[in-house]
Amino acid sequence: MSFSTIYKLSIFAFTLVFGVSGSGCPVLECWFVQEKPGHGGGLSVPMSQEKSLMFITTEAYSEDTINDLHPPADISPSRIYYVTDPAGTFCSSALNPAKGSVNKPKCEINPFMPHASMVRWASALTDSAQSPIYLQADWFSVAAQGLDEQLTLSNIMRAPLTSKEPNVILSVSSKTPSVRSRLGEEVLLDCGFWVDPSSPLHGSGFSIEWRYQFRGEGRLIVAYDGKNDRFSETSETGANIDIPALYETGNASLILEEAQVRHSGTYICTVYLPHLLAQVAVDLEIVEPPSLSIYPSPLPLLVPGQVVVAQCEASGFAPHILELSWEFTGADGKSRSLGQGSVTGHRQASDGTFSQSTRLELDTGKLRLGRGGEVTCVAKHHGEMRRSSATLNVIGVSAPSIEDSMAMVAVALVLYGVIKVLYWTFSSSDSTGTELNEKKEK
């Protein structure tokens, strides 16, 4: 398949995904960020930022079209850009909020300097030491983030010198800037790219790189030299990209066969062209809820004054942030907190998951456990709640239960009735005997 066909398919795929038309593209508010002039070198380079605006269309602007546009007066004319985006990469609904919406997409424009890549899997793209005349232009990089993390986008634009009408030459995007997965699942980290078919850079080859970063440490995951059709060796296993999809639609997504705790972090997808590159970042978080167990199981019978230590073990969870607590539900169905108990520190297993436990002294006197009920261990982890319960029975309690109290009342009422009847009987007999005695005396 020729590169011309590849990129024609790419533009068609992007048009389908974004559903674009010239009128459906947004007017994108951005910040133009660059180094302040006269401050070369040093570790900390002062930066300046100016308000900027991009009018975007999928077809080339005409002079009449530009004259019909009315940019706001508070933005410098030098920072107004009329962007031609044939594939409509900027025309996603995630970058086009509803009119009057407070939430707006984030956008930053930077000057871009074309340069040869130094990584070995992209070095073949610039075998010639000469820079093509095509690079003699004004180049810009645009980083945009859509609403609600629906899209992250990095575009390289070229404009003729002193012109404010750049064309999108290279676009790299991801529809999944933030991904969450359970352990053991297959994970897809989305990344796609498009190259302007009319650019002389298309057909000159490309390279793909996926790199992992976490807390200052990084490693190479996948590196593919598209010009020579070969992968660079890496120490990573269980990670790959779909080569047919890469050539057919520009799909450079990374596939992790089985999610592990060590996969949590930031993944950077970089696409190299001769003298150009663009990249997007995708955050992956592996979240696995804990499994809970209460020991001893079952809980032993308690007598008043006895103390039994119950332990709740939470295991196999990631990340390590976890809240453990205890609850007690009595015979009356009412629940109350028994506190956190004595919580241990985290322990990490060989697979990267964590475990933690809490111990609670079940003292019938101090905790007012009555005749017993349900003892529950509660674990709160990343917005989810897990519970595990065990039955606690207390025997020999002197205090009567509700049922006992009702029975005692019933017995008391019966006894009261019996006594009352006997009282009436004897009272009646005494009255009759007294009357007979009085009659005999008369």
Image (spheres, rainbow, N blue to C red):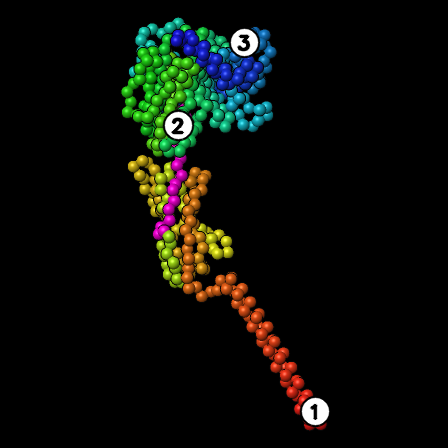
Question: Please, what is the three-letter code of the amino acid marked with disc 1?
Answer: Lys
Q: CA distance from mark 2 to mark 1?
A: 111 Å
Magenta residues, start to end: 281-297
Q: Quadrant of residue 212?
A: top left
Q: CA distance from mark 3 to mark 2?
A: 41 Å
From what the image shows, is residue 375 above or below residue 44?
below
Question: Are the residues at dot 3 and dot 2 in contact (C-beta closer than 8 Å)?
Answer: no
Which of the two residues, 5 or 300, is positioned nearer the viewer here? 300
Helix, strand or loop at label 1? It is helix
Left or right of 183 in this view: 404: right
Q: Is residue 42 visible?
A: no
Q: Is residue 232 visible?
A: yes
Q: Quadrant of the C terminus?
A: bottom right
Give the residue displayed 38% in from the left and 15% down from the top: 244
Which of marks 3 and 1 precedes in the sequence?
3
Mark 1 packing: few (<14 Cα in 10 Å), some, or many (20+)? few
Helix, strand or loop at label 3? It is loop
Give the residue displayed 53% in from the left and 65% down from the top: 407
Helix, strand or loop at label 2? It is strand
Q: Which mark is residue 439?
A: 1
> Which circle, 2 or 1, is nearer the viewer?
1
Q: Hey, which residue is sitting farthest right in the picture? A: 442
Which of the two residues, 292 or 441, is positioned nearer the viewer here? 441
Which of the two residues, 428 or 54, is positioned nearer the viewer here? 428
Which of marks 1 and 2 precedes in the sequence?
2
- Measuring from the top left, give residue 306's x and y in whole percent: 37, 61
Q: CA distance from mark 1 to mark 3?
A: 135 Å
- Measuring from the top left, give residue 128's x and y in whole percent: 32, 7
